[in-house]
Each structure stands twice: as C-alpha cells, then as structure tokens.
Image (spheres, helix red, strand yellow):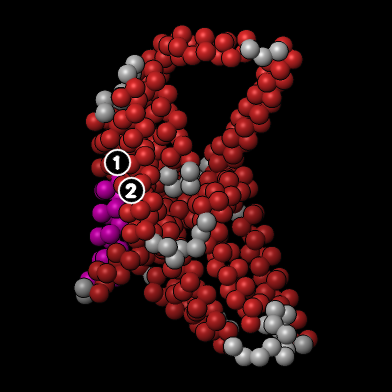
C-alpha cells in the first residue's frame, strides 16, 4: 500500500513540475509548440515516403519544403485578393452603415413605439450590459492571444525557428517514440501503450481531418458566395472556412456577415436566399459528407468541449494555449474514458457478490 502511495506521489510531483515549467516558459514556447504541431501533422507523409524506401532525412526535407512552398503559394495567391476586398469593404463601410440605418431604423422605431418608456429603458440597459460583457470577454481573449503569444518572439522568429524544430522532430520521430516507449514503467507498459494509441487516434482523426474540413468549407463558401454575386464573398468564405476549426464560430461568422452584406447589396429576396443557401449547403455537406469521411465518428471530442478548451487555452496562455488546447482536450478526454472504464470494472461500481453476466 505504501509503495502504491509513493508511486502516486512521484507522478503527482512530476506532473506539477512539468506544469510549472510550462507556465514559466510560456513566453518562449510558441515556435517550439508550433514546430511540434507541424511535425505531428506531417509525420504520416514522411512515414509513407519511408515505406517507399526514401531515407528519413530526405523524406523530411521533401515534405517540409513542399509544405512551405504550398503555404507560400497559397499566401501569394490569396493575400492580394483578401487585401483588395478588405480595403474595398472598409472604404464602402460608411455607405453600408447608412443603408442599414435607412432600411431598418424605421422598423426598430416602430417596434419601440409600441413599448412603454420603462420597457424601452430596461431594454436599452440590458442590451448595453450584454454587449459590454461580450466585447470585454472577446477583447480579453484576443489581447491574451497576441500579447502572451508574441511576448518575446515576433513573427520573423516564429517563421525561422518553427521549420527548424519541425525538421529535427520529423527526422528523429521514430527514435523519439522508441525512447518514450523504453521509459514507460514495465508493469504499466501495455496499459500506457493502449492509452497513447487512443490519444494518437483521437488527435490524428480530429486535427488532420478538421484541417481538411476547414479547407473544403473555405472553398465551398468562397466559390458559392462569389457565384451568387456577393461582393467580398471570397473573403467572407475564406475567413469562415478558417474559423470552422472552432465549432460553430466559422458558420455563424459567415452566416451573419454574409446575410448583412446580402441585405445591403441586394433588394430581391431571391439573391438573399441564395446567400443563405450557400451556408445551408455547406453545413449539410459538412455534417453528412465531410466530417464523417475526413474526421470520422470515433474521435470522441464534443464540439462544446473543444470550444471550451480553445477559449480556456487562449485565456491562460495566449496563442500557445490555442495551439495546445485541442491536444490537451483530447488527452483529457481519453483519460476520462479510460478512467470510467476502470471504474466500471472496480468494486466501487459493482458489488462483490454480483453474479457474472
């Protein structure tokens, strides 16, 4: 019994030390965490090349250079488009605001005219309070992301160090996994291997699959909004697809912004309905085709749990917290499921005299 307590105390102290080190080093962790995420994302491609007799170091160079070139090409292709549409939107914003006032303020005044002065005052105070709380929370999260995430390392340093970290991790990935396997306690080796396999399945299924879902949704939204004639539709679609990594946020952003732009630009209900139809089609494809095929139904990460993890990570550790939020959520989810299975097999759940099923 004392030996078991001693072992538990050792792991508890080790966990506290690791968490303390992460907290103290969080200002400089961003490029290293980004490199780890990038290496984990690209490792299956390097492994596939190694199966084809390509040396590990050469496969790492090929995959990493290909990824950098692809990202550079996408940035060169999309940045001028997004920049031009954003500048045009900012220029046209005053006229859009006037159009919204002319169209919808009379309806608001008619509605408020039917209420008593006390009800109007209560409605105004409640709206101001909720809006202030929402803006304050969003501002705090955004401020933490940028101030804590880029406290010591600017974007240039991130772009230089991240590929270097990713290269060495990709090249030495099999050695790292073997070293971790050798350090596992011998008595718990089978249990820990099973837990790590479940964590890897959850992470790979969600991160790699969700990245492809976001890319697909960005293409669907941007092409669809452009075809229906919505100005700035390409930018709205790309941003909505990118934000789809956060559950619900991408869809609601695109739907709200797209609807507002449609109400300003179009006067016929058919065109407005087509804009709404783009997001409806996107959601149908995501729910019935993209997510089941690319992510799968065995990931076990609930959207609300992911949303909570992302906001908690951003609030605690800035952009670094955003990067590690989903992996940490996946690890906790797997450990909770394993703990529940162990609990159901224990005497705490089943009486000793329970007959076998």
Instruction: State which quadrant residue 229 falls in.
Output: top left
Q: Residues within 10 Å of mark 1 (few under 14, many from 20)?
A: many
Q: Residue tagged by mark 1?
A: 220
Q: Quadrant of residue 271?
A: top left
In the image, 8: left or right of 53? right
- Locate residue 203, reporting x and y percent: 45, 63
| Residue 327 image point, x, y percent | 51, 59
Task: Please state the extent of the stretch shown in magenta in the rendering.
Answer: 54-71
Residue at x 25%, y 66% (from the top left corner): 58
Which residue bears the numbered disc 2? 285
Helix, strand, or loop for circle 1? helix
- Residue 175 in view in this figure: yes
Locate the N terminus and report the quarter of the image it occupies: bottom right
> Is 59 covered by the magenta stretch?
yes
The C terminus, quarter of image? bottom right
Q: Secondary structure at mark 2?
A: helix
Instruction: Using a 10 Å C-alpha cutoff, classify the residue at mark 2 as few (fewer than 14 neighbours), some (14 to 19) or many (20 or more).
Output: some
């Amino acid at each position: 019994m004392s030996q078991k307590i001693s072992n538990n105390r050792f792991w508890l102290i080790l966990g506290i030390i690791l968490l303390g080190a992460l907290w103290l080093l969080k200002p400089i962790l961003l490029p290293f965490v980004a490199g780890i995420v990038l290496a984990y994302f690209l490792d299956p491609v390097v492994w596939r090349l190694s199966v084809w007799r390509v040396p590990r170091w050469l496969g790492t160079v090929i995959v990493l250079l290909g990824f950098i070139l692809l990202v550079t090409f996408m940035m060169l292709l999309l940045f001028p488009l997004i920049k031009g549409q954003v500048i045009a939107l900012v220029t046209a914003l005053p006229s859009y605001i006037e159009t919204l006032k002319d169209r919808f303020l009379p309806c608001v005044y008619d509605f408020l005219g039917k209420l008593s002065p006390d009800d109007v005052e209560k409605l105004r105070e409640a709206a101001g309070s909720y809006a202030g709380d929402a803006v304050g929370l969003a501002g705090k999260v955004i401020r933490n992301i940028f101030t804590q995430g880029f406290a010591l390392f600017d974007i240039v340093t991130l772009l230089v160090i991240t590929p270097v970290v990713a290269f060495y991790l990709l090249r030495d990935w099999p050695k790292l996994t073997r070293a971790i396997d050798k350090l596992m306690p011998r008595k718990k080796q089978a249990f820990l291997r099973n837990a790590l396999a479940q964590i890897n399945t959850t992470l790979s299924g969600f991160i790699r699959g969700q990245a492809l879902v976001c890319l697909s949704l960005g293409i669907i939204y941007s092409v669809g909004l452009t075809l229906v004639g919505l100005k700035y539709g390409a930018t709205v679609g790309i941003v909505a697809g990118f934000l789809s990594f956060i559950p619900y946020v991408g869809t609601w952003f695109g739907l709200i912004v797209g609807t507002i732009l449609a109400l300003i630009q179009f006067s016929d209900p058919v065109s407005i309905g087509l804009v709404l139809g783009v997001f409806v089609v996107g959601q149908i494809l995501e729910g019935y085709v993209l997510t089941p095929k690319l992510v799968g139904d065995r990931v076990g990460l609930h959207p609300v749990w992911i949303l909570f993890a992302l906001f908690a990570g951003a609030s605690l550790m800035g952009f670094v917290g955003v990067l590690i939020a989903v992996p940490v959520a996946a690890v906790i989810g797997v450990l909770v499921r394993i703990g529940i299975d162990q609990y159901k097999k224990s005497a705490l759940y089943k009486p000793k005299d329970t007959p076998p099923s």
